[in-house]
Image: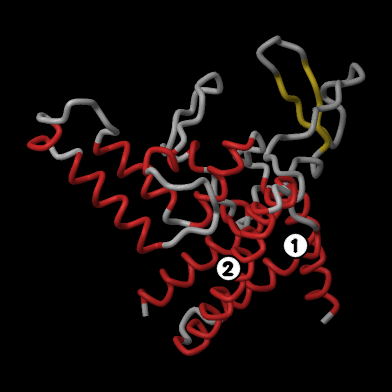
Amino acid sequence: MASRICTRSHRVRRFLCNAGSGTGHRPPLPVDSGRPGAAGTRTVRRKSTAITSVPWGRRPPPASRLQYGVLPPPHRRGHASSSPDAAAPDHFAALGIDRDFATDPAALKRAYLTLMAAAHPDVAAHRPSGGPAAHEVTLAYNIIKQPHPRACHLLELAGFPVEEGSAGGLVDGPFLMEIMDIREAVEDAADLPAVLRRLFEENNGRMEESCRALEAHFREEDFETARKKTAELSYWVRINEELRERMDEI
């Protein structure tokens, strides 16, 4: 029992070390005091040929499995320009809809189909003025129809982007502990369809709750809180995807 508690404590510290900082960078290496061959150390040679020593056991832990659970923002996944100097395209304007997190899926689909019909080569050739190209319309639709990319895009347009790797620093320790417990439950239920289905429905409830909170925060223009809720939503989305994969495998 004591061994299990010790192991869990070590996993918690390792997880918070990785996810809480939001980065995967190693800590700075201490400079050797002139004894590169000192016992209990290993010699590391940098490009500048400077010699440093790092005590064995001080190496940073490997990236936690939960770190991959943070989804990168849309502009990091090919949805927009990755150049820091390029202005973010307004996908809401491309679709001709209001810039709002709360969207009507049916109205969004109609706007998409109308623009795609207008962008058809046989129709576009006879238009007096140009409009968005088909690939721009498709790109905008794929972002706006999904809650997490839509929230990231709204924050980017408002000047409060969620940078890649920053989600772990936007959520608190208790939330990360909750994520770890849920992922352990998912692993334990790998071959239990009924349990996976229950976990899937519970996680859908968490996603819906996050979306309701985001609607209110965007409506109130509380972008800092919206950033935190968007970071939390990225964890729920990844858990949802993993549960879908596991249920499909059974």
Question: Which residue corresponds to the image point at 10% horizontal and 29% vertical from the top-left?
Answer: 125
Q: Nearer the viewer, residue 44 or 220?
A: 220
Question: Which residue corresponds to the image point at 49% horizontal and 36% vertical from the top-left?
Answer: 75
Question: Which residue in the structure is indicated by mark 2?
Answer: 207
Question: Which residue corresponds to the image point at 57% horizontal and 36% vertical from the top-left?
Answer: 157
Please, is residue 93 above or below residue 193 in the view?
above
Label 1 neighbourhood size at 10 Å, few (<14), some (14-19), many (20+)? some
Question: Which residue in the structure is indicated by mark 1?
Answer: 11
Q: Quadrant of residue 73?
A: top right
Residue type at mark 1: give it. Answer: Arg
Residue found farthest to the front: 128
Residue found farthest to the left: 122
Question: Which residue corresponds to the image point at 81% horizontal and 32% vertical from the top-left?
Answer: 54
Q: Nearer the viewer, residue 223 or 18?
A: 223
Please, is residue 194 above or below residue 91 in the view?
below
Q: Nearer the viewer, mark 2 or mark 1?
A: 2
Determine whether the residue tagged by mark 2 lies in a helix, strand or loop: helix
Residue 180 coordinates in the image, percent (x, y) = 68, 67
